[in-house]
Image (cartoon, grey):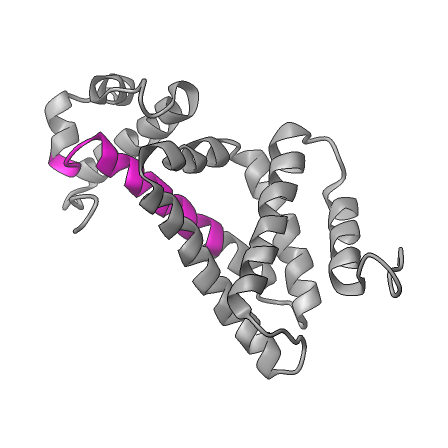
Amino acid sequence: MDLVNQPFTEKGQKTLDALVEASRRNFYTKGYYKTTVKDITKDAGVSVGAFYLYFEDKLSVYKYLVTTYGKFIRAHISEHIKASDSRKEAERAGLVAYINLVRENPDIYNIVWEALYIDKEIFKDYYREFSESYIRQLEKSKSNGDITYRDPEVVSFLLMGMHTFIGLRYGTLDTKEDVEMIADEVINVLFNGLSGNNTNQ
C-alpha cells in the first residue's frame, strides 16, 4: 500500500512538501505521540482536510518520513563513495559523509528510533533495507578480492552499528570534533584491527 497519494500539480506538491516538513519538525520537537494531525496542518499552513488528501493518518506520514530518510541517506552515501577505488576508501568516504549528514539533520535519530515505541516493524524494515543495500556493496568488493568474510549480514550490521553510533556521538552529541580525524581512527581499527597490525598511519 502506498504511504502517500502523490499530487498531480505543482501546487499539490508544495502542499505535500509543507506537510512532510511540518511533520518532521513536530515529530522531532514533540515526539510522535504528542503530535496531532492538527499540529501538523497548522504548522504547514494548510487545512486538516488537505492532510487527508495525501495521507491516511498520522502513522502513514510517519512511515513515509522514515522511508524517505532511509532512501535519502543511502543515496547521499552512494554519491560520496562512487569514486572510491577500494572498500577501505568507500568505508571512509561513507563514514565522513554520514557524520556530516547527521550534523545537518540531527532529527534523523529522534524520528527513526522512536519507531521502536510506535511500530517495531518500521524500525526493522529501516535497518533491513540498509543491510540489503550494504550487502550488495560488500558482495561486489568480495568478488573483486578486496575483502573477505563469511556472513555478509553479520558484516553489514557490524558496519551499520559502527556508522550509527559514531554518527550519534560525533554527529549529534559533539559536533566540534574533526570528522576526518574520526574517520581515520575508525578505518584504521576496522582494517588493521585492535592489535597486531594496528597503525596510526
Residue 150 in percent (x, y) is at: 59, 74
177 to the left or right of 46: right
Residue 8 in percent (x, y) is at: 14, 46
136 to the left or right of 194: left
Q: Quadrant of residue 46?
A: top left
Q: Quadrant of residue 200?
A: bottom right
Residue 39 in percent (x, y) is at: 26, 17
- Residue, x 79% and y 58% (percent of image)? 188
Position of residue 79 relative to residue 50, above or below, is: below
Residue 182 in percent (x, y) is at: 75, 45
55 to the left or right of 174: left
Asked if residue 124 lies in the magenta stretch, the reply is no
Q: Main secondary structure of the magenta part?
A: helix
Position of residue 185 relative to residue 191, above or below, is: above
Q: Which residues are magenta?
A: 53-74
Camera-side residue of 158 and 92: 158
